[in-house]
Amino acid sequence: MVAPALDSMASDLKVKSETEQYLMMSIFLLAYALGPFIIAPLSEMYGRVVILQSANMFYLIFNIVCGFATSPGQMFAFRFLSGFGGSAPQAIGGGVLSDCWRKEERGAATALYSLMPFLGPAVGPIAGGYLTQYMSWRWIFWIVSIADAVVQVLAFCFLSETYAPTILATKRRKLQKETGNDKLHTEYDSPDRTFGQELRKNLVRPLRMLFTQPAIQALALYRGYQYGLMYLV
């Protein structure tokens, strides 16, 4: 949605170069690409729901303040931070689908979910161009934030945890409180592993997989090529 508004944004924010102008759009994608390396591992430590909702709130806050930016530096910072939070559905969505469906059943859900990131950039410029022409480029951020706030309220009301280890950990804590037996544990617990070790393991795993698994490398290159073509157009 931002692409049609770049000229107006550059004029209002006194952007001096064409590179900075396009950076206002592309810096969001940089954070969108880096965010999953942190957000996805955290979802395996704290559960899908709490990380997804926290990241969405992070995105919501910084997307709102993008509409109040008065300088290129502010816009770059706010866009980067909103992109980081906005990467959560991309980072966690595949895991949620795996939690909810067996591998032989999740094909249709995965196909539909994978379509959405490409549908948005196709439809967004139409809405962004309309808002820029008849309202203001700032309303691009505010209207998206209003829609996101509605989704966030619905998520608070209806979104349930799907990650099995987190669900079992919640049940374990409840039983420990009811019975007073602190020795109760689940098959996923690792009492001999510290928090730091667990955090390091989860943060390193995606990078290790990216650099050692040819299938993941091929898909990552292909996905990057697709995104590059889409945003060049």
Image (cartoon, rainbow, N blue to C red):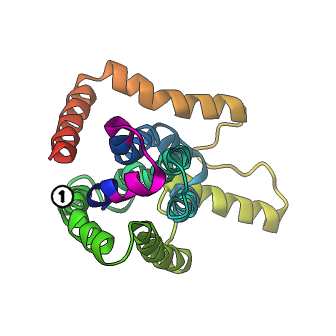
Q: Position of residue 76 (x, y in %)?
A: 49, 45
With respect to residue 153, does 67 lie above or below?
Answer: above
Kindly identify the residue that appears in the image at 56 percent across and 49 percent down: 74
Element on which disc 1 rests: helix
Q: Is residue 15 magenta?
A: yes
With respect to residue 71, does 111 lie above or below?
Answer: below
Kindly identify the residue that appears in the image at 26 percent across and 59 percent down: 4
Residue labelled with disc 1: 111
Q: Residue furthest top?
A: 212
Magenta segment? 8-20
When asked about the image quadrant of residue 73, the answer is: top right
**Predominant secondary structure in magenta?**
helix
Q: Does any portion of residue 26 appear in the rendered image?
A: no
229 left or right, relative to 202: left
In the picture, the quarter occupied by the N terminus is: bottom left
Q: Position of residue 79 (x, y in %)?
A: 47, 50
Q: Is residue 168 magenta?
A: no
- Circle 1 packing at 10 Å, graded few (<14), some (14-19), many (20+), is few
Q: Position of residue 18 (x, y in %)?
A: 32, 39
168 left or right, relative to 36: right
- Amino acid at circle 1: Ala
With respect to residue 205, does 61 lie above or below?
Answer: below
Q: Residue furthest right?
A: 180
**Which is more toward the observer, 186 or 160?**
160
Q: Position of residue 82 (x, y in %)?
A: 49, 53
Q: Does any portion of residue 82 appear in the rendered image?
A: yes
Kindly identify the residue that appears in the image at 26 percent across and 33 percent down: 220
Kindly identify the residue that appears in the image at 53 percent across and 46 percent down: 44
Labels in figure, total: 1
**Which is more toward the observer, 219 or 76?**
76
**Which is more toward the observer, 183 or 90?**
90
